Amino acid sequence: MTPTARQQRPRPSPRRFAALLRQPSARRFGLLLLLLAGCGVALLLVPRPDPADLPRLAHSLGGYAPLAAILGGALLMVALVPRTFVTLAAGAIFGPLAGAAYALGAALLAAALGFTVGRLLGREFVAERVRGRLARLDGWFSRQSVLGVITVRLLPIAGFGLVSYGYGTTGARVAPFLAGSVIASVPTAVGYAALGAAVTSPGQINWYAVAPASLGLIASVVIIRRWWRAERQPAPS
């Protein structure tokens, strides 16, 4: 690289950075990044409870235990706790069927919360700056159907909470996002709730209940293959 080229390369300056911070959308986006960073640090530092100890806590809550499970599970997923742990805990507390139902309720609420936070704090900043291929990708999210959301949810690209935040920063519609998020969560919710129930009642679990967890992988392959074939088809003239 010649000296002239090095001189022409733009360099960040405190003045440009200060001007960026004066923009409301940039400040909100920075708050979103700080929120995600704080959740990540807490995830590393806060110890997780043993699922075998959770039934005693649920018993102390009495009739409020299901509501606490849904609200608490949703907040944990929004805080980037893996959905697998939340579902295992729900199965350990309530059994395979009720645990799966409460885990799905928590997933729906967590998807709505994460999407809302991402939309409020990050969408304007992203929309102002996407260009070229990123703009086309944002347009793809805007046109996405329930099937498209299921495809993204089943891909092992990021955790449940992080994907929810990310979707909020795109132009995705909320109804297909929520529907796709719940549908994609069903197979693993049933399977992991059954595994969680096995922790506390190993002799009372029908292990055929774990079979739906394998549907996630099968569905991923089928959906990705259909999406790939559709992308390779020439656009209509």
Image (cartoon, rainbow, N blue to C red):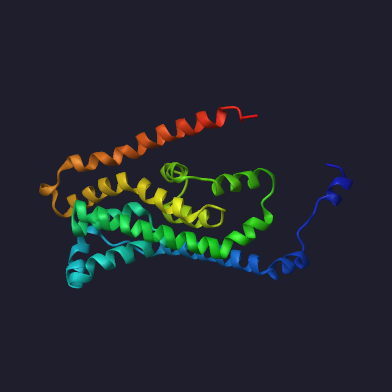
**From the viewer's perspective, is 169 left or right of 197?**
right
Going 68% across and 55% down the picture, which residue do you hit?
Answer: 129
Quick one: which residue is furthest to the front in this view?
Answer: 237
From the viewer's perspective, is residue 22 above or below residue 40?
A: below
Q: Is residue 80 visible?
A: no
Residue 147 drawn at (x, y percent): 44, 42
In front: 40, or 68? 68
From the viewer's perspective, is residue 153 above or below residue 101?
A: above
Using the rendered view, name the quadrant where residue 53 is placed.
bottom left
Going 13% across and 52% down the picture, which residue do you hit?
Answer: 201
Q: The C terminus appears in which quarter of the rendering?
A: top right
Q: Is residue 223 visible?
A: yes
Residue 75 drawn at (x, y percent): 38, 65
Quick one: which residue is furthest to the right in this view?
Answer: 4
From the viewer's perspective, is residue 35 above or below residue 203?
A: below
**From the viewer's perspective, is 233 left or right of 75?**
right
From the viewer's perspective, is residue 7 above or below residue 219?
A: below
In front: 53, or 204? 204
In front: 120, or 38? 120
Q: The N terminus appears in which quarter of the rendering?
A: top right
Using the rendered view, name the quadrant where residue 214 is placed.
top left
Residue 46 drawn at (x, y percent): 38, 65
**From the viewer's perspective, is 119 left or right of 124?**
left
Residue 77 drawn at (x, y percent): 39, 59
